[in-house]
Image (tube, rainbow, N blue to C red):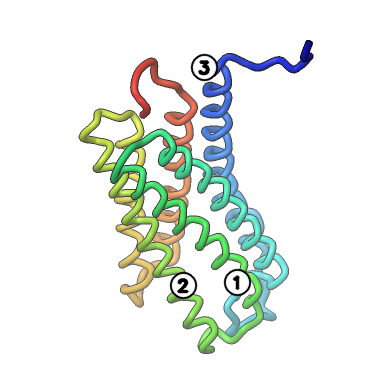
Amino acid sequence: MSDITTRPPDQVEGRSLRRAGLLTIAGAVLMPLAGATLGSVTTNDGAGTWADPIQPSAFLWMSVGLAIGHLLVMVGYLEVGRRSDGIAASFARLGALGTGLVAGVEIWSGALARTDVDSAAVTWLEVGYLITSILIVVGTLGAGVALLATGSRLAMPLIVNGAVLLLFIPLRFLAADADDGIVIATLSIWSLLYVWLGVRLGVRRSAGRQ
């Protein structure tokens, strides 16, 4: 006789959903927390560098924290893809891809902390941020709109999140005189909106995949 026991499918499913929701919430909170704490460690020694005015080592660890936060949020996108069908699942996976790639860009950013802000490396880093931001926006809004037609409770968190990031892109990449405070506030709101998605992910519907 085997001594291996198996849990009922509904119990396993419920735990999987709660885990995905909690990881998404953790990532959503970690990103602005890392920015607020480590980003406040400033110095005058790094003038003209990518990290300026943040102390370079603090900037590196902030970047690592942001990367971990993105990877945790990526779990949420993967769970949306798993619980969805057709084009909604495809868009959710695109969002996961963009989120995973931006985690790598964050590590790259930290590695360039002491690099001259006008260098070619920093220019390419900005291109990396722009490309990954577009991937996330398309994936998030696409999944949200596709799920809206199904009545999914995941639709609105995705649509609002994608809309805020869509607002951020021209602020960050096209408006040369954009106020840093507005840019940071927009990013913080965008990140914390993943809490809404995480809460919705953690609740299992009695019917349907969404």
Could you classify mark 3 by the number of other residues whose Cα lies within 10 Å: few (under 14), some (14-19), or many (20 or more)?
A: few
Point out the residue furthest to the left here: 149
Residue at position x 62%, y 53% from top? 68
Q: Of residues 119 and 146, which is closer to you in this image?
A: 146
Tell me the quadrant of the picture where the C terminus can be found: top left
Residue type pointed to by label 3: Asp
Q: Are marks 1 and 3 in contact (CB under 8 Å)?
A: no
Q: Are marks 2 and 1 in contact (CB under 8 Å)?
A: yes
N-terminal of the pair, mark 3 or mark 2, is 3
Q: Is residue 159 above or below residue 51?
A: above
Say left or right for 46 vs 21.
right
Q: Of residues 116 and 147, which is closer to you in this image?
A: 147
Report if residue 184 is visible in the image. Answer: yes
Say left or right for 146 vs 118.
left
Q: Which mark is residue 100?
A: none
The kind of secondary structure element at disc 3 is helix
Q: Which mark is residue 128?
A: 2
Residue type pointed to by label 2: Gly
According to the image, label 1 marks what residue?
A: 108
Q: Position of residue 185 (x, y in %)?
A: 43, 54
Q: Of residues 25 and 205, which is closer to you in this image?
A: 205
Q: Position of residue 184 (x, y in %)?
A: 46, 59
Tell me the quadrant of the picture where the N terminus can be found: top right
The kind of secondary structure element at disc 1 is helix
Q: Is residue 205 above or below residue 105?
A: above
Q: Is residue 54 above or below residue 98?
A: below
Residue at position x 53%, y 43% from top? 75
Residue at position x 33%, y 51% from top? 164
Point out the residue furthest to the top here: 1
N-terminal of the pair, mark 1 or mark 3, is 3
Q: Is residue 42 above or below residue 24?
A: below
